[in-house]
Image: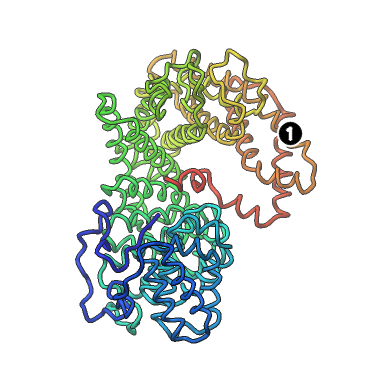
Amino acid sequence: MNRIYGLDESASLSSDSGMESAEETRPSSTTSENSFDDWPWNECSGLDYPLDYDAAFPLVQNYCLGLVSGDVSIIKSSAQHLFHLCRSGFSEALLSFLPEIFMTLKTVIVAIDISKHPDLIHSLSGIFYYLTENDTAAYLVPPDSYIAFVAKLLSFPLESALYYTVAGLHNLLDHKSLRDKFRTPLIIILLIQILWTCFLYDKSFHPPVTCNPYLAFASSTSLSKFLSIACDSLCLLAHRNEMSKRLIHAKQGVIPLLYFVHTYQFEKTQSVCVRLLRILSTQPQTKKDILKNDPTLRFFKRSANSTFQQISLDAFWTLRNLSDQCASLANHQMNEISEILLLKLRSIEESLRCWKAKIYSPYDLQDRYTISRCISGTLANFTCRNPFTKLFLVENGAVPLLARLLTFTMNELSSHSTLCQSTVFGGLCMAPPKYDPIPPSLLSCLCGRRSVSLSMLQATVDCVEAALRCLSHLTSSHQRANEALHQLAYDWVDCFLAGEKGVCWMIDLLHLTSHDEGVCCKDHAIQPMPEQWDALDRGHVFQLAKAWLSLARNRLAGGIWRSPDQEAALRSAVGRLELFMFPSIESLCQTRLQCKKGRAGQAVCTEDYRLLCCALCVFVLLSAMPPFTDAVRLFVDLCVCVCVCARLQAKEPAAAAVAATSDSDGDEDDANDDG
C-alpha cells in the first residue's frame, strides 16, 4: 500500500525507489501556496491534541457536527481540525467512533460549492487519504460513498488534493473486492484527464501555456511520485478489464503515458508506466495507439536494458504483445530491434551456463526463461511472411542460438528442477520415471505431498511453440533457407524434439487436455490433481503440434541430414503423432457437431473457432507428409465444424471482432500482468 507523507520530514521516497536523489527542475517562482509540499499548517498547527482516544471522542463528534452545520467558515474549520487529527494518528479512532464519516464527507461536497474553497478541498482530501490507510475502511463504508466523493475531488486540479485523493483511491484499489466498484467510466476518465494535466504541466515551458495557480509541482520528484501512484491506479483498473482499456483508447491516454516513459528516469515511475503499457498492449485498439505514437518503439529500446529487472521484463512482454502488429515497421527498424533481441538471447544463454555452475538461483533463472519466451514469440511474429527479417536472423546466427536454448530448456525440465520454486523438503525432485522431459508443473512429486500449479505448463508449451514456429519460418521461403536447414541439422541432434521424445511429450499433453481422467492410467508419468484439469488448454497443444509439424515438413522437404537415421527417426515420429492426433481431432469434431445451435452452443463454438482452425491446419500438415492415413470423412467433418463456427460468429459482431483481432502471441493479460 502506498503511503503519502504530505507535510512531515519523511516526505522523501525510500532509497530503493530510485527517486530520492532527484534535483528540482522548476524554479521557485512556479510554486504556489496550494502546492502539496508548501501547504500552510493554518491555525490548527499549534493545537495540542489529546494523546488518548477517549479524550479525542468529544472533539471528533463536535467537528463532525461542524461539517454539517451549513456555515462555510465552521465547515472549513472543522475539516481542518479533523484533517490534523487524522495526521496525528486518530484516523482509526475516527472510523471506529463514526463509521458514517464518509457519508458526512459526501454530504459536504454535495451541499456547498467546494471549488471556491481550495483549503477545504485540501482538508477533505487529506481526511479521505488517512482514513483509507486503515484496512477497516474498505469494509465499514459503502462503496457508493467512496465513488461519489472520489469523483468530486478528482475533478479539481489542486496539487495537494490530487495527491491525497489518488493515493487514497490507490489504497482502496489494493482491495480486489472494491476494484469492480471503481471501474466506472467517470473515475477512469478523470484519472486519464489527470495524466493529461500532468503531461501539459510538464511541458508548460515548451511551449508556454497558461499557468495553473493551483497546480505547481515543486520538483520532478514530487511529480514523478504522483505519476507512479496515478498510473498504478490505472493499472489496477485496466487489468483484465476491456472497458477501461477502451476508455484509455478513446481519451488517447497512451500519448502522455509514452511521454512519461521517454522523459522520466526514476525507476518507480518507469516501472509503473511500462507495466501499464504492457496491460494496454493486449487490447487491439490501444495496441495500435502505442505503435502510432511510438512508431520506432523507442520505449522498448529505452527499457529493454534497464538495470531494474521488472522494467526489462515488462518491456519484453509489451513488445511481444505488439509484435503481431509490427508489419508497419521499416525493415531496418525491424532488424534493429531483432539485433537487440538476439543480444539478449545470447546473454540469457550465457546466464544459463553460469547457472549450471550454480552462480544464479532458480528464481533468477525463471525470469530469464520468461524473457526467452517473450523473445521467441516476438521473433516468430517478426519472421511471419517477412523474408528480410528471416535473412537478417539467419545471417546473425539465430537458428543455432534458438536450437541450443530450446534444447537446454527442455533438457533442464527433464530434471524437474529448473522451473520449480521449491519442494516441501527443500530439495530437488527426482526425474520422472517414464518420459523425458516432462514439464515440472505437470508433476506431483514422488513424495506425494506436492502438486504444483499448472500455470507453468501453459508458459512452457507457449515457449516451445514460439521457438518452433520461429525456426519453421527461418527454414522456408527466403534466399538462405537451405543454410538455416544446414545449421539446424547440426544443432538438432541432441534436441528432444527431433524424434520420439518430443512426440511422447505432445501425446502426454493431448491426453491431459482431453479432460478425461480415464485417459491417464495409474502408471502414467503425469498425474495432475483433479482440480487442475480445467487449467489445461487443448488449443495450446494444437498450436504446439502445428509448429512442430511445420518444422518437420520443412526438414523433410529440404532433405538435409547428418545421417540417414535422422530422416527415418523424424518420419517415424510424424507417423506416431498422426496416430494420436487423428483420434483427438475426431473427438473434437464430434463434440462440436453435437453442439446445439442455440445460445449456449453459439458461445461454445465462438470460443473454439480458433481451436478448430488450428486442428484443420494440423490435419493439412499431416496429410502432406507420409505416412498418412486416408481420412476423408474426418476432413469433411472438420471443415463443417469450422464453417458452422464461422457462421455463428457472424451473428455476434463483437465476438467475431475479438476473435479476429486477438492473437496467440498478443493476449498475455491474464497470465502476465501480475508480476
Residue 492 x, y percent position in the rendering: 39, 23
Q: Which residue position holds label 1?
A: 591
Residue 52 x, y percent position in the rendering: 38, 62
Q: In which quarter of the image is residue 395?
A: top left
Which residue appears at 31% of the width and 71% of the height? 48
Q: Is residue 200 placed above or below 664 in the rendered structure?
A: below
Which residue appears at 66% of the width and 23% of the height? 517
Circle 1 packing at 10 Å, graded few (<14), some (14-19), many (20+), is few
Nearer-the-camera pick, 363 or 123: 123
The N terminus sits in image quarter: bottom left
Q: In which quarter of the image is residue 518?
A: top right
Residue 438 x, y percent position in the rendering: 48, 22
Which residue appears at 28% of the width and 49% of the height? 306
Nearer-the-camera pick, 307 or 127: 127
Q: Is residue 161 placed above or below 300 in the rendered structure?
A: below
Q: Name the secondary structure under disc 1.
A: helix
Q: Is residue 528 placed above or below 188 in the rendered structure?
A: above
Give the residue at the far front of this rendering: 55
Query: Is residue 196 something one can see in this rendering?
Result: no
Q: In which quarter of the image is residue 627?
A: top right
The C terminus sits in image quarter: top left
Which residue appears at 60% of the width and 53% of the height? 658
Residue 136 x, y percent position in the rendering: 50, 56
